[in-house]
Image: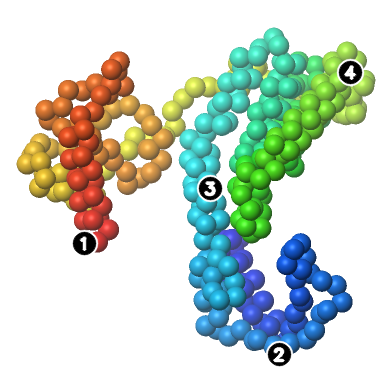
Amino acid sequence: MPTAYTVLFLITIAVAIFTWIIPAGSYQIDPETGNFIAGIYEQIPRQPQGLWDIFMAPIVGMVGDANTGGAIDISLFILFIGGLLGIVNKTGAFDAGVASIIKSRKGKEKSLIPILMIIFAVGGTTFGLAEETLAFFPILIPVMLAVGFDSIVAIAVPLIGSQIGCLASTVNPFSTGVASGMSEISRGEGLFSRIIIPIILLAISIWYVYRYASKVEKDPKNSLLYEQREADLAHFKMNIEDIYEEYDFIDALYVPADSELITTLLGAYRDITGDMRPPQVSGGATFARTMKNCVAFGAIFAQTKDTMHQPNEAWPLAEMEQTMVIYAEAIARLCCE
């Protein structure tokens, strides 16, 4: 399958070709409403785009030109959020959290309906959780079947929950963020109504799914999939204890001491402090392990009393200022030399 960049490049080429074929035209825009004024379309000379324009299109799209506003602020925002979501997905934090909730509600599985629908709705309204919910179908279907519901309930919980959140996105960068940037309005404009709407819709949705689940629990014949219930029970037979296993699947991170990153950071530190101690290996586990060329750098000196993550944690101002000098020197060496 072609990558998204390949598809976008092919679309750009197609649009450039169309500029040689399709007649060009223009409209006038109402300055008060921003809408096109009907009935004033007129043709203008074509402005065919060549090879250079094709390669310049991504740059113009980012920084803009005399006729087009740039979208670099929106693009960087989406890249930042996308990186954050990539870390969450890579570590399996969201999946493990949902699985942990499912296990904690053993014996009270019906309460999973409002709890999980709220979680999925929050995901949808904040970071556009949508097709990612497909991964939860095989987790929820056996759970819901085992406690007397059906697969419709299992699918409705993540699907309806996430889509209600996406439908009334509050701060979703992929819908509200992009639309606000293109409209040149604050992302906070209309936020109150975007908070009220998903609350109302989610309450109705939870009631509807919960009501249907209660009917199926009372009499399985009320299920819309009653005819295949036995086949589903046989196919998704499970032990609820098996749905959540706590484990660490991220490899330990080790950056060689002779790597360019380590030698550059050590050089900046040693030249400023005169401290020639060798680099150290630290324990613990953080999401930093997903970044393959990442190390902890600072900010305790040889003479510093270690109060990190302890009561009365403190950092002398003089050492803070010296740390900033070291960081500035290290950044300059990494980026400019």
Query: N-terminal of the two: label 3 or label 1?
Result: 3
Mark 4 neighbour class, 10 Å CA radius: few under 14, some 14 to 19, many 20 or more: some
Q: Is residue 41 left or right of residue 249?
A: right
Badge 3 is on which residue? Answer: 82
Dot 2: element:
loop
Mark 1 neighbour class, 10 Å CA radius: few under 14, some 14 to 19, many 20 or more: few
Dot 4: element:
helix
Point out the image quarter for the N terminus.
bottom right
The location of residue 93, given as percent across then percent down, is: 52, 31
Q: Nearer the viewer, residue 186 or 261?
A: 186
> Relative to 75, does residue 292 appear above or below in the rendering?
above
Point out the image quarter for the C terminus.
bottom left
Q: Is residue 272 left or right of residue 321?
A: left
> Relative to 198, does residue 19 appear above or below in the rendering?
below
Dot 1: element:
loop
The location of residue 332, given as percent across then percent down, is: 23, 56
Badge 2 is on which residue? Answer: 45
Residue type highlighted by circle 1: Glu
Q: Are marks 2 and 3 in contact (CB under 8 Å)?
A: no
Badge 1 is on which residue? Answer: 337
Task: Give the number of the disc on residue 215.
Answer: 4
Query: N-terminal of the two: label 4 or label 2?
Result: 2
| Circle nearer the viewer, 4 or 3 | 3
The location of residue 135, given as percent across then percent down, is: 64, 36
Query: N-terminal of the two: label 1 or label 4?
Result: 4
Estimate the spatial distance between the alpha carbons at disc 4 and disc 2, rounded to whole Å: 66 Å
